[in-house]
Image: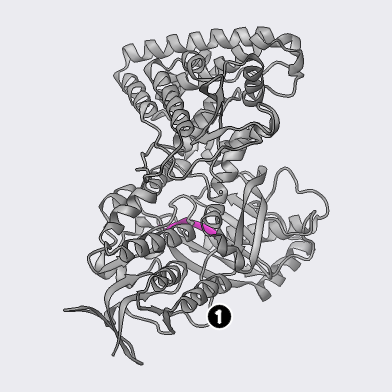
Amino acid sequence: MAQFDVLIVGAGPAGSFAAELLAKGGAKVALFDGRPAGEPKACGGGVTAKALNAWPELLNAVGRTIHELDLYSPSGKRLHLKLDEPFAVYSRVVFDGYLCDRARDAGAQVFSEKISSRKITKTDNGWRITSETGEWSGAVLVGADGANSGIAKMLAGPLAPSDMEVAFGYRAPLPINLSVNGVPPTVVAFLPRWVGYAWAFPRPDHISFGIATTQDAFEHQPLDDLLWRFMIGYYQQCAGAPKAPKANATFWKDEEDTPQTIAVREQLRDTADRYAARIPGLAATTWDNRTVSGDDWALLGDAAGFADPVTGEGIYYALRSAELYAEAYLRKDPASYETSWRQDFGAELRRAAQMRRRFYGNFWGAPFTERMIEFAKGHRGVKRVLGNLVAGEQGYTDLKKKLVKSALRPLLFAVATFALLIAGYAQVQAQKVKHSRAVIEAHRVCNEYQKLLAEDLDFDRAFEATFSKNPARRRQIAISEGEFGEIDLTRVDTGSLIAAFKSRMQLLYLMLPLISPANKEQEEHFFPPPIKAIFERKAPQTAAAFPSFSRQLKRDATDLRAHLDQLAARDPSVAERIRNFKTDLSKEIPLPQHTVHPLTAYSKGEVLPLSAYYYQIGSYAVIREQGQMKIIGIRFFNRLF
C-alpha cells in the first residue's frame, strides 16, 4: 500500500493547486482525478481578474481574454461595460488539465481514480483510500471533489437544498458573424421573473451558454425554454454584425418563428452539447456554523462551499483556499486554515449571502437588477463599479464605502440604495507590513476623514479638515468627482462648483441611513414627495444656471438634515439606523496588507500633473501638500476585477 503525507481527492482547480503547492513544499502528495479524460466540468469557465492578478501564471493556459461585456436588465436594457481589468474564459478541460500538469510537474503523484467516500476509512495514523485498482494511505485527507462532495458530507455534514444553486447550459458553435471587432460578444443577462442570470461566454472554439439560479427556484422546463430564447436571440444579434448592438435586446420575448430563428434552432439542436451542475450558495447562517477542516482533514473550493452566492463564481475561492491550506500545512499548523479562510474571504462570502435575496428582489416597482442597470447607464462611477463586480475584483464588504464616496449624480437615492444592498463593513486583520512614514500619515488622514464624518455626518467639516487646500486642485476635484453633466464647467466660478460638490456629498451621507426601507409604507414615511423631489433634481443645462443650482443644492441639504432630525426624534428605528451608520463610518480603515508605493498619473492628469506622486490607501488618493497629507479623491475601484 502506497504511503503519502496528503491524499487529495479531486483534481479541479482547488485540488490541483493545493497538490502543486504542497509538493513544492516537500510534502508527498497523492492527487486523485476521477473525471474521465476529456470530460469538461459543467461551468462557464470564467476566471476573474482578481484571480489573474493573484496568480498571473494562469494566463499561460489557453483561453480568451475578455475586455468588454454587455450586461442586460430583465427587460432587455443593454449596458456596455469596458472593464478596467480583463477576466478570462477557459475551456475547463484545458484549464483543469493545465493545473493538474503543474501539480504533476511539482512532484505530486496523479492517479486517474474515481474515489467514493464509502471507500475512505479512518485509521490510527490517518486515512486509507481503497479502489478496485489499489490502496493508498496518508496522514491527511483533503476533499476537493466539488459541490456534491461525498467527503464533505462525511466530515462536515450535508448542505440543505437552500444552500445550493443550479447551473445548466449548452456548449455551442461560434456564430458565423461575430461582432464589430471580430470577437463574439460576452453577455450576462439578468432573468425576468426568476432569481439568477444567463450568460454567453465565448471560448476559443465554442460558446458556453448557461443559466445560474437557486435550487429553490429551479424549474427545468421553463428555464430551459428561457435559455433557448436567449441563445437564439444571441445568434440573431450576432447576425446583425457589423452593426453595433442594439440599445435594448429582445432575448426573452416569445416571438413568432422566422426562417432565421428556425435555422438557428435547428443548428443548435444538432450541435449544442448540454451540461448541468450544482453550485454551492451558502446562506449567512451556514457560513457562521459550518466547519471545513479538522486536525487531519480539510475541504477546499466547492467542496467547502466556497463560491459567491450572488454570481456563483468559485474559481478564485478554489485557488485561494488551496493556497491558504498549503500555507497552513507547510508551517505545521493545519488547524489555522479554519481561521485564515474566514479572515481572508469568509466575510466577503457571508455578506454576499446576506444580500443575494435583495439583489434579486424588487425596488420601486421593478426588479432591482433593472434599476441597477438604469442607474449605471446614468452614472459612470456606478458603471465602473458594476463592471468590476461582474469581472470579479470588487468585493462586497467594502463596496458600500466606494459607492458612498463616489455616487454623486442627481439620482443619489437610487444609487445609494444600490450601495446598501450590495454592501456591509468587515474589518480585515492586516498582516504586519512595515510601511513608510508617508504611508502611515496618509492612512491617518483617511481615518481622520471618516471619524469626523461619523460624528455628525457633516461632509463640509470633514472635507475642510482633510482634503487638499489648493484652490485650483479643489476646483478640479469638484469637476472630476462631481458628475455635473455635459455643460461647459470652465465658465462656472470655483465657489459654485465646490459648493455644489460638497452639497451633493452631503445629501448622499444624510440619505444613506434611510435607504432600503422595510416596506412601501416605510418608504413613503422616509421619503415623502418633497424629499423625493430633492433626489430627482437634474443638473442645469447651461453654465449660467449653475450658481443657482448650487445654491439650491445647499438648501436641499439643509432641508434633508431637518427631515432626518425630525424622523429620528419621532421614530426610534430611524435613530438606530443613524447610530449604526455612524458606527460603520467610524470603524478604522485597516492598514494595507501590502507595501504601498507612490503612484503617478492620478485621474489621467486632471487633478494632479501626470508625473506627480500620490498614495492609494483603500478608496482614498492622498498627496503630500505643503508638508501635510491631504486627500484628493475617493475612488470606486482601486485594487489592481
Q: Name above or below for residue 181 compared with residue 27.
A: above
Q: Secondary structure at mark 1?
A: loop
Q: Nearer the viewer, residue 295 or 551?
A: 295
Where residue 455 sits in the image (x, y, percent)? Answer: 37, 17
Residue closest to the far bottom: 133
Side of 48 where 67 appears, left or right: right
Q: Name above or below for residue 21 compared with residue 198.
A: below
Residue drawn at x 57%, y 45% as measured from the top left: 388
Side of 451 where 172 appears, left or right: right
Q: Quadrant of residue 44?
A: bottom right
Q: Quadrant of the N terminus?
A: bottom left
Say whether residue 630 is visible: yes
Say whether residue 346 is visible: no
Color scheme of the displayed model: one colour
Looking at the rendering, the stretch of residues picked out in magenta corresponds to: 211-215
Q: Name above or below for residue 75 compared with residue 149.
A: above
282 in magenta: no
Tell me the residue that label 1 is attached to: 38
Where residue 478 sits in the image (x, y, percent)? Answer: 63, 20
Considering the whole magenta stretch, tell me its main secondary structure: strand
Q: Residues within 10 Å of mark 1 (few under 14, many from 20)?
A: few
Where residue 569 sits in the image (x, y, percent)? Answer: 32, 11
Residue closest to the far right: 242
What type is the residue that disc 1 sits on? Gly
Q: Nearer the viewer, residue 271 or 321?
A: 321
Q: How many marks?
A: 1
Side of 431 where 255 appears, left or right: right
Where residue 376 sits in the image (x, y, percent)? Answer: 61, 36
